Image: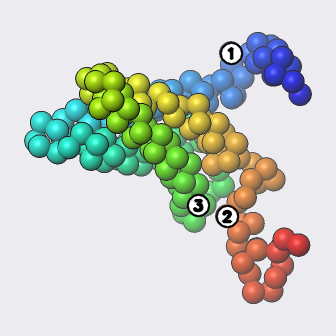
């Protein structure tokens, strides 16, 4: 499939397509996360916490809250039931977000310390850097269907002593 085919497919897709609904929910959850992130990143330095430390802490807190909201709202019904499955999705979500946190933290340093943009504006710019990565990783891996991702059950089968399900 070419890039042009992908663009056509997106244009032809209804605004009410499930993936578009998830994107809208993801944006809504993300905005709540941005508010949490912004409050911590801008607020903690007023108490003497370095901006980079505040930004890193803010990303961790907002990531965990975003996971809970995305799992219960955005991708509701896409993940298997059970506490173990919920934890496995959480592990995958956090793993994908570690890359996003690194990108965002580097962006915050670049925008604020290199370019001199005030933290109030540098922080949302740095958050925006990981947006596309985050949605794509969530859609294709974290909440992917059983047959399209490395699931909790596949991991258990691969690690079982009987060797059942091991890759060759």
- Residue 88's tag is 3
Residue drawn at (41%, 39%) of the image: 106
Quadrant of the image occupied by residue 114: top left
Whether label 2 touches label 3, CB < 8 Å: yes
- Residue reaching furthest front? 114
Secondary structure of residue under mark 3: helix
Query: Which quarter shows the N terminus?
Result: top right
Q: CA separation, marks 2 and 3?
A: 6 Å
Residue 158, image x, y percentages: 76, 74
Residue drawn at (84%, 71%) of the image: 167
Q: Earlier in the sequence, mark 2 or mark 3?
A: 3
Q: Earlier in the sequence, mark 3 or mark 1?
A: 1
Q: Is residue 114 above or below residue 59?
A: above
Quadrant of the image occupied by residue 133: top right
Residue 150, image x, y percentages: 72, 58
**Crowding at mark 3 (Cα within 10 Å: few <14, some 14-19, many 20+):** some
Is residue 124 found left or right of 119 in the rendered image? right
Residue drawn at (68%, 29%) of the image: 19
Secondary structure of residue under mark 1: loop
């Amino acid at each position: 499939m070419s890039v042009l085919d992908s663009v056509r497919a997106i244009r032809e897709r209804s605004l009410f397509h499930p993936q578009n609904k998830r994107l809208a929910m993801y944006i809504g959850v993300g905005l709540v996360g941005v508010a949490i992130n912004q409050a911590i990143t801008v607020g903690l330095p007023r108490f003497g916490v370095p901006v980079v430390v505040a930004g890193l802490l803010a990303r961790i807190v907002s990531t965990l809250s975003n996971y809970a909201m995305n799992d219960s709202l955005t991708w509701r019904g896409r993940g298997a039931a059970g506490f173990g499955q919920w934890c496995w999705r959480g592990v995958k979500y956090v793993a994908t977000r570690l890359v996003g946190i690194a990108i965002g933290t580097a962006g915050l340093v670049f925008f604020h310390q290199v370019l001199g943009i005030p933290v109030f504006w540098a922080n949302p710019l740095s958050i925006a850097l990981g947006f596309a990565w985050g949605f794509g990783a969530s859609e294709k891996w974290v909440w992917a269907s059983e047959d399209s991702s490395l699931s909790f059950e596949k991991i258990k089968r691969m690690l079982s002593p009987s060797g059942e399900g091991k890759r060759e």
